Amino acid sequence: MYHFKKITFIILLAGTVLSASAQDKSISIEQLKQYRQHCVLSGANKAIANALAVNGLKPLAIAGQNDIPGGTYFSNEVKSKGITNQQKSGRCWLFTGLNILRAKMIQHQHLGEFQLSENYVFFYDQLEKSNLFLQSIIDNATKPMDDRLVEWLFKNPLSDGGQFTGIADLITKYGVVPAECMPETYNSNNTDVYADLLSEKLREYGLQLREMATKGIKATTLISRKQEMLDEVYKILVRCFGLPPEKFTWMRTDAEGKPVSTREYTPLGFYNEYIGNDLEGNYIMFMNDPAREYYKTYEIDLDRHVYGGHNWTFVNVPIEDMKEMAIQSIKDSTMMYLSCDVSKFLDSKRGYSDPGNYDYADLLGTQFPMNKKDRIRTFASSSTHAMTLMAVDLDSTGSPRKWMVENSWGADYGFKGHIIMSDKWFSEYVFRLVVEKKYISEKLQQIAKQKPTLLPAWDPLFAPEP
């Protein structure tokens, strides 16, 4: 009896301790009173609260005296002809990649305003991504549904986002065509409904393939069934985007619009003749991620567009290394693929990005001291948009004051379709840069050849640019 009472007492005591601990972890009435006492709304604080009651944070935080250093002048600029518009789609990666290629074509062929067909490449992007998903389901059919990779696949069967290695794999396989040979459609410009429906279809197919695999059906039969599924996917793509041309006739004109030649081409033949750049071997992607070790090569598992293609691979470097390569490239009239956290401190009316554009700290009476490393590892910042880096403004010492990118949100957005970035903003919110090898040091080229450290497909910083 004595021992029973002792045990009961210990249990009750433990329960009391646990209860007290839980109470300490909650917000008490006394704490609420303290919070209220520390927040006296009078004077300027009251005025701010009144203003926020009927206004958003952004317009009230804007710093009206934050001028662009040197205005819109740039000491070094690669000229472009014609701002593109991705409309309501996540194809910034594709527009950026094709803008780089068309700039080379315009420069070398002395063309006027010219655009490559994003719709053509996007058609094959969606077909290849569908195959990548279905084949990956077959490859991992023995794993349970709650396996991390299988779960990730079903959560991400398809995306209209992407990255540069996908552009290289797609174009070297399918070529390119001028925009007029496969123009945009409503669904290529507005991908949300289409993408949801095709994703649902792919998930349905994925479950079918897994069920077949559990019944012991051979891999060759599964692949045959997958081909039937892709035939259905192809029909959906044709209805939404049109039928890609196998051949086309194109009249080449000069910068003044005068005809030069009219010929028939295949998409791959057109690419090889007018661009013909070694996309797979001539470019290296660099990342500035202070949360990971510098001067190392990384690879993202399953982050590719084509099943037999290349995973996204990059060299992680300090931001100053990126800037040095970018300056060399721009001075040599060569644009670059850049991605960043585009919405941070962007004044869309002026098309200017700078941390000093908005004073949220004084408006809210607090500070936001996290650096780039802390923002990355706490998921506060990541790459959200790809654009074409085309200009830099250097001061008298050769140091960059500001940068400019060609955007794909139409000519009416920002500064005549461009966004100007202060050098400070560039350091804090630019993540990726794709550079031609001739602007890359031998040291970095050798690092790019090392065996990459493999990162998982679900690493959040490496989601495709939408």
Image (tube, rainbow, N blue to C red):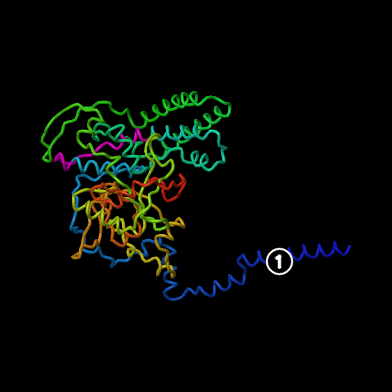
Residue 397 falls left or right of residue 60? left
Residue for point 85% across, 63% down: 3
Residue displayed at 18% across by 58% down: 75
In the rendered image, residue 28, in percent from the top left (x then y), is placed at 62, 68
Rendered-image quadrant of the C terminus: top left
> Where does the N terminus fall, quadrant-wise?
bottom right
For badge 1, the amino acid type reads: Val
Residue sitting nearer the eye, 13 or 351? 13
Pointer 1: what residue?
17
Is residue 127 shown in magenta? no
- Overall secondary structure of the magenta stretch? helix
For label 1, the crowd category at 10 Å Cα-Cα, with few meaning under 14, some 14 to 19 and many 20 or more, is: few
Q: Which residue occupies 43% across, 76% down?
A: 43
Residue 230 position in % (x across, y down): 42, 28
Residue 64, above or below 123: below
SS for callout 1? helix
Rendered image quadrant of residue 165: top left
> Which residue is at the front of the view, 174 or 243?
174
